[in-house]
Image: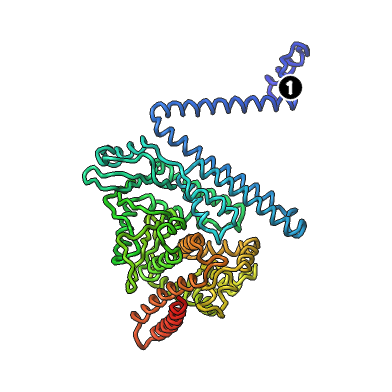
Amino acid sequence: MSKFTQSFRLFSHSIPAHARLQFPRFTQSQQKSNRGKTLLITLGVVSAGVLSAAGIWSFYDPVGFKRKQMELVRTARISMAIIAIVVDYKWSLRDSNSPELIGLDKYLKIKSDCHQRSADRLLSVARANGGVYIKLGQHIAALVYLLPSEYTETMKVLQDKAPKTSLADIKALFEKDLNISLDTLFSDFDPNPVGVASLAQVHRATLRETGQKVAVKIQHPSLEDHSPVDIRACMNAVKYIKRIFPDFEFTWLADEMRINLPKELDFEHEAANSERVKWNFYGNKVLKLPDIYWASKRILVMEFMEGSRIDDVEYMKKHQIKPSEVSTELSKIFSEMIFVHGFVHCDPHPANVFIKPCPNYKPSFFSKSKNFQIVLLDHGLYRELSPEFQLDYAHLWESLINGNESMIEYYAYRLFTYDDRPKNKHETTGIHQHRLFASMLTGRSWDAISNNSAIGGGLATARTNTELATVAKNAQNGHFFKAIVEVLANVPRELLLLFKTNDLLRSVDSALGVGKVGSQVDDMLKIIKVMGWYCATCIRRETEVEGIWSIAYWRGLFEYLNVGFKLWILGVYLTIKM
């Protein structure tokens, strides 16, 4: 020890206690209080810095600042809703609420209530955010046979109600995109839209140059800024739920939106799709597509079509149009898209399919013309099918029509890529996957599909109360729902959109009274006959590409003749009954 240190210690001890420099000693509560004050001061400084930066940003870039502000609000809405949904499910379906402890009926009631609360939260977000979220809600509403009814029924309100764009914003859009005023293009422009959808709205107008009555489809301007952020927010929300609930397999829903939405937002792409379909159906007197006059990325001008929604039965009665014939012709159109052209409209909900009386119709005993036309609108979302997929899909439907389980199983596993090896039963639920897959595709119970005693096969029979009760019971079964979710997560993307298309077409048939309990069996027979012929036509193509000495050639020829003969017998039966 140094002499200096010794001297300092002696000096300090010589100072009286009351005269020494006293350092404050804080109690534990005082220390916590000081830490709290420090934290508050830090937060205050940070907040002041953020607000100052935001103020400077808003001054120099008010448009960009407002955009980011709206993005934050929109993302916060979906984030808070997802957190609330996750907490609700975790709490409602906790171990103490298991069906073994509280009984199955009470458990199902708790789960149904939780579904409903969650659906209401998503509906609230969709209405507040609009645009992409309404489109997502409409997609959920279309999956009637695949999702809990609480979700599909709640989201149905979004199919007809969407926020509209103001006339001032429409004028600004024309100036920005086309560098031309609305009045320069149109001598008359109705400010009230004839239809408002999630992504766009349609106005009636008159071209100034030609006097032609046109429909002007205008994309909601806010989508250009919001859609990329909304898509990312939805993707992140789904990933978050997946982490919390490993069994949650709805990431495909967000993936489909991410892939398809940019296509739907490009009206030049939509115009090209429309022209392609018009060429595919050249000479078809029933299908009508409006002529396209010109298109830009966010504005589409086309022929104005009169008529009403395809589910408007009263309109059909007024114009003496038979709903059953409309259903049959709609089945022909989509069967041709799937099995012949391989280019399928994947959003045929009633607002996109119109019915109108056929102009200059003259009934004739020898003519097969109809007194109506089906108008197909909104061509933004299509799915291309490869020839291989078409052929397997045709074989599958031919097997479904015949109720041939072994062939249903074979072609279901060719299409259903669950994993590298086919499995006869789900490993944990014991559910036959090919049977579930067949029911999801057709919207019918397996008992109905496998009913070979019916004329035209089980699919040609009308639904019974017993079948509806069976479907409802299975929908409440957690094992079935889990198996359905896993199917949706693993099937090819082509099948995802075909599931949606099939569900939408079935909802149209239901609205027209076809296939419902108590409906005419002959109506279902006609639809099966139509689809069967298109399947047979697709199968026949296999004989055209394979050599005469190949097994595939003779298998395809046998199946074509087999299906053709049964459908010919069915046609004779229907003719005799008429």
Image side of residue 174 versus residue 389, left or right: left
- The percent coordinates of residue 245 (x first, y second) are 61, 54
Q: Nearer the viewer, residue 410 or 171?
A: 171
Q: Is residue 569 above or below residue 339?
A: below
SS for callout 1 = loop
Image position of 394 with respect to 95: above or below? below
Q: Is residue 347 visible?
A: no
The percent position of residue 22, horizontal first and vertical second, equals 73, 16
- Front position in the image: 198 or 87: 198
**Residue under the point 51% across and 63% down:** 513
For label 1, the crowd category at 10 Å Cα-Cα, with few meaning under 14, some 14 to 19 and many 20 or more, is: few
Classify 181 as above or below 202.
above
Q: In the image shown, does 378 or 56 lie closer to the viewer?
A: 378
Q: Which amino acid lies under the numbered mark 1 shown in the image of this protein?
A: Arg
The residue wearing badge 1 is 25
Colour approach in the figure: rainbow
Residue 385: x percent and y percent? 39, 67
Task: Look at the image and tell me in which quarter the C terminus lies.
Answer: bottom left
